[in-house]
Image (spheres, rainbow, N blue to C red):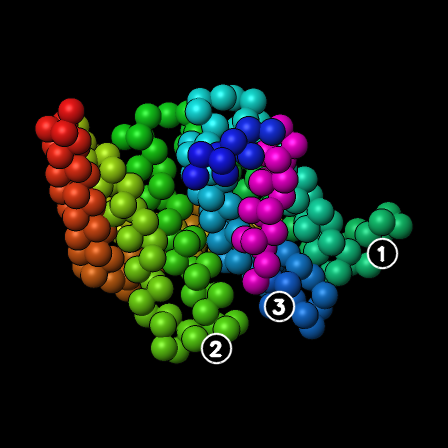
Amino acid sequence: MRSTARVWQNWWMQIVAGLLMTAVVVLPWLWIGKNDSAIFPHASNDMLGLLVVFSVLTLFSAYFVRRNARGAVKFAVLTDVGVALGLIGFVLQGLYAFNPKIFAGKISDASVHQLWVVGSAFVLCQILYFLLVRLPLGIVVLLTAALTTGISLWLTIVASLLGGAGEYGAYLNYAGPLVLGLALGILGFMKAVHLLMWLLALAIQWVMPAVFTALAALGSSSGRSFGSAAAGFANDVAANMDSSGWQIPTLVTLAAAMLTSVVLLIARKVRKHGH
């Protein structure tokens, strides 16, 4: 583990890490887009996929940096450069697949819309990335709760491509709640403020599937005024929340959180007595 961590301390390997994470997250769309040759989801026909890519990539890269950077800002920036370079390459390839004349100056309305959506998602995820990297764990778990829906969706997409969606898809929906549970478990429950974070994280987790669905509908449509778009988004969130099941994901998160907290608490006590 230490030798692996040392490898990532080389500046160029940090850029490579960003490129590799981007490639891994986008890889399922290499198969999905085999008919139109696109390797990146397009807002016109796969807005949900676009949200999944950005949310999962933000979580993966932020975790990688927190795990290996030792607080170095340069590490976070260089990793982000790798992610950005990978995204630029994939986005340009996807634009060309849907609009082959784009580099000749003939850009379609769909491509303009794609650029606006991707640019907005990129800016938002850049903010979330640096917040996840720099803020204390108590705030990080709340941001994690907002993004873990993407993990469940990404794994479900991968399973569907491997032919296992019918058998394992229902279980993969709980991957995001499990990840959030692990994060909450690491945070612990020994302080009142941490219990408050647990409650807020569970509330965010409950609403986020509805938010993802509403954002997918919002991003796939174009030409709407800001007022009508905002009203439609709010209505979609409310409607999707009525049909969303929250009990089992909440139980999965709580079970993982409690188990992780207890195990870590016992490990700390054992280590303390050992010294």
Q: CA distance from mark 1 to mark 3?
A: 24 Å
Residue at disc 1, secondary structure: loop
Please indicate whether residue 120 sits to the left or right of residue 130 in the image.
right
Predominant secondary structure, magenta span: helix
Residue hosting label 1:
101
Q: Quadrant of residue 38?
A: bottom right
Q: Percent position (x, y) of residue 189? A: 14, 35
Residue ranking furthest to the right: 104
Which residue lies at the image location 58% right of the left edge and 40% below the top edge? 17
Q: Is residue 202 magenta?
A: no
Q: Quadrant of residue 146?
A: top left
Which residue lies at the image location 34% right of the left edge and 33% below the top edge? 140
Between discs 1 and 2, the one toward the N terminus: 1
Q: CA distance from mark 2 to mark 3?
A: 13 Å
Q: Percent position (x, y) of residue 169? A: 37, 70
Which residue lies at the image location 50% right of the left edge and 58% below the top edge? 48
Task: Name the amino acid type tagged 1.
Answer: Lys
| Above or below, comparing residue 40 to residue 139 in the picture | below
Between discs 1 and 3, the one toward the N terminus: 3
Of 266 and 138, the residue lying toward us: 266
Q: Nearer the viewer, mark 1 or mark 2?
A: 2
Residue at disc 2, secondary structure: loop
Residue hosting label 3:
31
Residue hosting label 2:
163
Question: Disc number at residue 128?
Answer: none
Quadrant of the image containing the C terminus: top left
Range drawn in magenta:
11-28
Of 263 and 258, the residue lying toward us: 263
Task: Name the amino acid type tagged 2.
Answer: Gly
Q: Within 10 Å of the Cα at label 3, are there few (<14), some (14-19), or many (20+) other Cα atoms?
A: some
CB under 8 Å between discs 1 and 3: no
